[in-house]
Amino acid sequence: MVDLGRRTVRGGAVTIGTQVLKFLVNTVGTIVLARLLTPEDYGLVGMVAVVTGFILLFKDLGLSAATVQKSEVSEAQISTLFWVNVALSVAVMLVTATIAPLVAWFYGQPRLLGITLGLSVGFLFGGLTVQHEALIRRQMRFSFLAAAEILSAVVALTGAIILAWNNAGYWALVGSQLIQGFLYATLIWLFCRWRPGRPVRYSGVRSMIAFGRNVTGFGILNYFARNLDNMLIGRFWGSQQLGLYARAYQLLLLPIDQINGPITAVAVPALSRLVNEPERYRGAYLRLLDKITMLTMPLMAFMIVTSDWIVALLLGPKWAGVGRIFSLLGISGLVQPICNTTGWLFISQDRTRHLFQWGVVGSTIIILSILAGLPWGARGVAACYSVTFVVLVTPLLFWFVGRQGPVRLWIYTELLPPQSAPSAQYS
């Protein structure tokens, strides 16, 4: 708390710089791998990713967020949570390996059996780093995370290119994920000096588990809503259309994640420390919200207008179908970064029960929009999803999160020009 402001500014600078470097790495990877692999390769891995991504939600159970949010945590609590996460990751790995034949049967693709088994190993690496990474974030030592993320990403990309160059096909994508997970876990353990002790039965982790349970519940609902489109397009329209849709969605998330990701990493621990000071909390959130809006909206509008050029430049002519899908999804991308900031409020204010409740409402609306667009293929899903998100989901979310807490619904009018909604009182 003594140097919270300095840590926040420094952490923001480090994380934004990290995202710039990761963006460059991902861009290079996208350009090179798109020319070495085919849409079918991405589609096959995308089919498995729908399943493995869902199972991955149970590895953490929201316990990393609980470690970051709580004002005080003990050695016994962190050690207990560490072993809970390890046990969960092992269970997740075994469950994924067990259902691998079912995944291959569901999509009618025997090759998915090996892909699923390969990706299941990566869950173990993640479980070993949950609490170490949470402690680093809690202490706002983002330079350590930056080094681990960039180094592991570069090495993983190099491995993927080497595999793809040697005609490994979709195994290049699988190998890349395993390399990155193993190296990231190794580096996090080297950078974080804390080592787990024995689990303690009565260490006071019940409230933290309840906190994490609601976060996980929301994650499950949100993940299902966000990935049902991939599952249904792959099931009814095949790997070709899924490959095009998945790449369009990846391009949509690329700029959003580069901006929202680093600011979220700084915002949640900073706002959690200010939750008992409403004026400072409100002012800090509004300043961060201004930056998000200023950076993302113009960028997304530019990408929508130039989508065909961007696809041709980054992916090449065989991915031409991505441009139209991206321009449709980009409509929702105009407001998604702003909507994502509401998660900071739910978590930092310990309102994870409300977060779960919103997950039920928001996910139901999104699922209905996906089903409505499915008869028209990938383009129909993209169009229905975007229109529903902008017209219905966004205003409902702002109303829901602003019902209580330091940030009320009217604060979003601060995004308007100064003459309409002066913001000096919160600066």
Image (cartoon, rainbow, N blue to C red):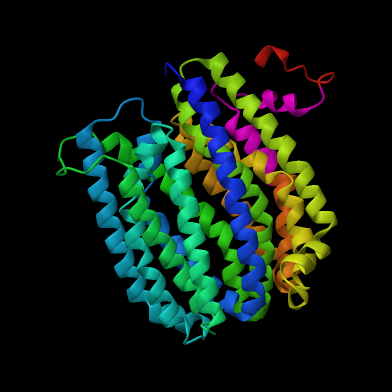
Count of numbered circles in the view: 0
Image quarter (top left, top right, bottom left or bottom right) of the N terminus: top left
Q: Report whether residue 296 is seen.
A: yes
Indicate whether residue 404 is drawn in magenta.
yes
Q: Quadrant of residue 59?
A: bottom left
When the figure is inspected, residue 163 is found, relative to residue 133, above or below; the finding is below
383 left or right of 208 in image? right
235 left or right of 78 in image? right
When the figure is inspected, residue 124 is found, relative to residue 99, above or below; the finding is above
Q: Report whether residue 367 is seen.
A: no
Residue displayed at 71% across by 50% down? 333
Q: Nearer the viewer, residue 335 or 372?
A: 335
Q: Quadrant of residue 204?
A: top left
Q: Position of residue 251 (x, y in %)?
A: 68, 59
Q: Position of residue 385 (x, y in %)?
A: 70, 57
Residue displayed at 53% across by 48% down? 360
Q: Nearer the viewer, residue 202 or 178?
A: 178
Q: Position of residue 377 (x, y in %)?
A: 72, 73
